[in-house]
Image (cartoon, rainbow, N blue to C red):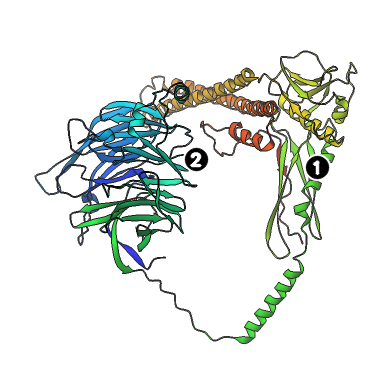
Amino acid sequence: MSLFKARDWWASVLGEGEEFDQGCLCVGDVDNSGSGYDKIVVGSFMGMLRIFSPHPAKPDEQTEADAQLLEVQLPDPIIQVEMGKFVSCSELLHLAVLHPRKLSVYAVSGTAGNVEHGDQYQLRLVYEHNLQRTACNMTYGPFGGVTGHHFICIQSMDGMLMFFEQETYAFGRFLPGFLLPGPLSYCIRTDSFITVSSIRQVECYRYETLAVATDADTRQDSDQQSKSSGKRLTADWTLVLGEEALDICVPNTSSAMSSIFVLGERNLFCVKDNGQIRFMKKLEFNPSCFLPYGSVSEGSTNILMCNHNNMLLVYQDVTLKWVAQLSCVPVAVRVANFPELKGLVVTLSSDGHLQCSYMGTDPSFFTAPKVDAREVNYDEVDTEMKMLQKVIREASKTQGMVHRVQTNKSTVYSQLTHLLACLNTKLHVMYLVVCLTGSGCELVVRFSAFLNGHYPPADLCGDIAVSYSSATGIPRVSQCKFNLPLRLVCYPSSAIKNAKYKITVDTNKPPVNLSEVFPDFSEKSENNDSSALGFQLITGSRVIVLASKTSQRYRIQSESFEDIWLVAKELVQRFDWHFASLGVKDFRNSFTGPIPLPEFFETVDHHFELRVNAQKYQDLLSERAVQFRAIQRRLLTRFKDKTPGPLQNLDTLMEGTYRQVIALADAAEDNRERLIQAFTRLRSATHLLILLLSLWQGLSSEQTAILEATLLPLLQDTPQLVREHIHTHTHKPTISTETIISSKLV
């Protein structure tokens, strides 16, 4: 912690609930006043563009309103703002505003008023470019050695550098080996662009190399053309950093050699413009932003650096010169000149704290609170020490105690599986007895599992979490997972040979008797065929498993595509358990395709259609509700009128509107129930698709988990087309706890 604070010269809080980043701040004479003083331009992700001309506060004066020259609400989020000579017919400074899909160039002009506080500032659009790709950041400069003007280079999220020669789009080039966008800067002396790739290395590309490289509309076209032609885009030089880069800056401090400063997560790098490291500084903190600028000493550069500890540090190359405390964590820092003071430090935080400060010597002292002086009662202290020693001895005795609740997860799981497999097939509400064993006591908890809807569930997995306190009062949590048996949702049925939907699972071992794999479904069917097994879902269709007599293949078929999921999952798991019990270690399930994408897309389309219908019903209900309230107001006005008059059929119209509202509400409720069922079937279809993909490609459990996290929807369906945790109907067997555990296991 620094002894000194940065002295506040001017400060302001921008908006409420707005967000800012390192590209949202720039300083300069944006209105071309010619005074030599700077203005502050700030853009936010909410699309607010503000321009300030700060000055210090006088006694009893509100300066925040006077300091703000302009505030404009733009329709798109603002990613970055820059000042430069961006107009071909003018050498004045203009403001470039980068949006996700648009680049806009504005002219800022001020008109002096005739009275006090009468100056007016206007923002005029000069030109704009609609971007075909989503932008990430931009840089500007006299590309190609042009004089008197600045060109703009925009980096897209998919790795394309788009070059704009003021009002004209010049060309675009894809960076080779691109994965994620990094910081981008331009070096004037070498006419090159500096970036940090996703493989954590600094890469330099000359403008001339980019201009003559092969053009392409897509990355695939760029890769194919670069292989067939000799104009493949390659970096002029690269330098491995070994860490992610937060920002890149190339200050124009020397005409003989340019220094490229790269701020990493743990180090500061200074690189010459030929790729050689000039120096490297290891940081003992997490930096948030930095700004290199010219130093009074020849051959050195000053660096302003901010960190997440609210500190502003001033370095001269690798030497720390000053540390000051800030009031917030900046995401952008600049140096600006204002009428009464030059060289002010301008900082902007992520939540909109804009501050102009300078290095002062106002100390920030910490004053310790006064301690109440009291006489010591030695008898009480001795009693307290004996009590603490007793607690320590008791705790040391229980250090070697093993809490069997933590190690008894497999026992609980096996007890659950054995108990559930022995349940009556006609009773589809389960009552479990779970034994929780601790050190010295046992606690039995009874809970039930049942179907929550007239449709098959999408999953049969359950979770058990037990929270308890140890003998020394330490809170602990023990968790385990279990699978409910398939007999909870289906029962044996006769097998049929034909069905609409079919999938085939291959194995690398000879076919087995299905009655051995499914002993709980071994009731003999009418044809007494052990190579065929039928599963009748309680609230669904019939699923048939057929074993080939000549090959190592098993077919699962049903009249419903989604209902195949539970049986297919159970078949694959029981095959693994069966061959593992026989000591076979090289057993493997596989799927040769084709992947049933048309059937999966049918489920997706049906679910989407119901979502659209839900929105339509919601809109119609809103319209009818507005109409109903309007009729009510009209009738109320007629009833309050002292002079009785005819109702003009308003009562009939209200009754008809009421019936429409009730009918629409019933239809919306019916659609909601069908949407819940469709969502559950969509989860089942997605589960089945992931299972087939994992068998097809031989994915490991970790890779399958990644695929599930990517494709599977959450347990709830929400009105928005986003993934949100909103409590609604649970579309799987609901575990209702009849007893809430709040006990100490000792």
Quarter of the rendering containing residue 130: top left
Image vertical order of residue 367 relative to residue 692, above or below:
below
Q: Residues within 10 Å of mark 1 (few under 14, many from 20)?
A: some
Residue 351 location in percent, x, y?
A: 38, 49
Residue furthest top as drawn: 498
* In this picture, residue 340 sits left or right of residue 594: left
State which quarter of the image contains the C terminus: bottom right
Q: Position of residue 44 (x, y in %)?
A: 35, 42
Q: Nearer the viewer, residue 378 or 261?
A: 261
- Left-right relation of 254 to 543: left
Q: Is residue 1 above or below residue 493?
A: below
- Visible residue check, residue 73: no
In the rendered image, which quarter contains the N terminus?
bottom left
Q: Which mark is residue 416?
A: 1
Q: Residue at x 47, y 53 (%)?
A: 266
Q: Position of residue 296 (x, y in %)?
A: 25, 58
**Dot 2 lies on which element?**
loop
Disc 2 residue crowd, few under 14, some 14–19, many 20+, Cα 10 Å: some
| Left/right of residue 481 with respect to residue 317 in the rendered view | right
Q: Earlier in the sequence, mark 1 or mark 2?
A: 2
Q: Position of residue 274 (x, y in %)?
A: 37, 43
Say if residue 511 shows up in the picture: yes
- The answer to whether residue 625 is above or below residue 441 is above
Residue at image point 28% right, 60% down: 358
**Mark 2 — residue?**
199
Q: Nearer the viewer, residue 655 or 305?
A: 305
SS at badge 1: helix
